[in-house]
Amino acid sequence: MKIKGFLLTSEVLTIIVWAVFFAIIVFIDPYKSATSIFILFFALLFLALAGSWGLLEFYLVTKYKGFEEIRNRTFNAFRHGIMFSAVATGLLFMKGADVLSVWDGVIFMLAIILFEAYFMTRGTILNENKSN
């Protein structure tokens, strides 16, 4: 799939996910809903934030730094979106379950940051091996 098709598909899916997310907020009563609605709520929040962050980062990076290595930047932008939405959704889920404290939140965020650090170091190792 070409980059333009991928970005257009991502944009449309992100808009649809945001629409369904807001429909859940408006039309569903949280006091009478089942557990599956809460799971759907957090899953849609995760997907909406990941798509929005990924698209926003991709467009800002390509606007200010140019279009070279566009495929690598696409992967990085959506990976950062997934990491950001994992932190936001995870912290909200922990708050909703009444298990969030400051230290639990810090440890959760550090775990996501270490996961991102793994990808950053793995990318430089792969690039160094290709040049040799």
Image (tube, grey):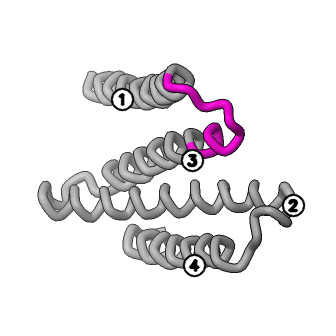
- Point out the tag, 3 or 4, that comes first from the N-terminus: 4
Q: Is residue 41 left or right of residue 92?
A: right
The CA distance from mark 1 to mark 3 is 23 Å
Which residue corresponds to mark 4?
A: 19
Across and down, in percent, residue 87 comes to 50, 40
- Point out the tag, 1 or 2, that comes first from the N-terminus: 2
Q: Give above or below for 6 relative to 113.
A: below
Across and down, in percent, residue 86 comes to 54, 43
Name the kind of residue labelled 2 in the image.
Answer: Ala
Total number of numbered discs in the rendering:
4
- Point out the tag, 2 or 4, that comes first from the N-terminus: 4
Disc 2 or disc 4, which is closer to the eye?
Answer: 2
Q: Give above or below for 49 relative to 122.
A: below
The CA distance from mark 3 to mark 4 is 17 Å
Name the kind of residue labelled 1 in the image.
Answer: Met
Residue interval drawn in magenta: 92-102
The CA distance from mark 1 to mark 2 is 40 Å
**Mark 2 surroundings within 10 Å by alpha-carbon count, few (fewer than 14), some (14 through 19), many (20 or more):** few
Q: Nearer the viewer, residue 117 or 89?
A: 89
The residue depicted at 61 percent of the width and 40 percent of the height is 95
Across and down, in percent, residue 37 comes to 79, 62
Which residue corresponds to mark 3?
A: 89
> Is residue 44 magenta-colored?
no
Query: Residue 52 occupies which quadrant of the picture?
Result: bottom left
The residue depicted at 54 percent of the width and 72 percent of the height is 18
Name the kind of residue labelled 4 in the image.
Answer: Ala
**Mark 3 surroundings within 10 Å by alpha-carbon count, few (fewer than 14), some (14 through 19), many (20 or more):** many
Which mark identifies residue 120?
1
Across and down, in percent, residue 127 comes to 31, 30
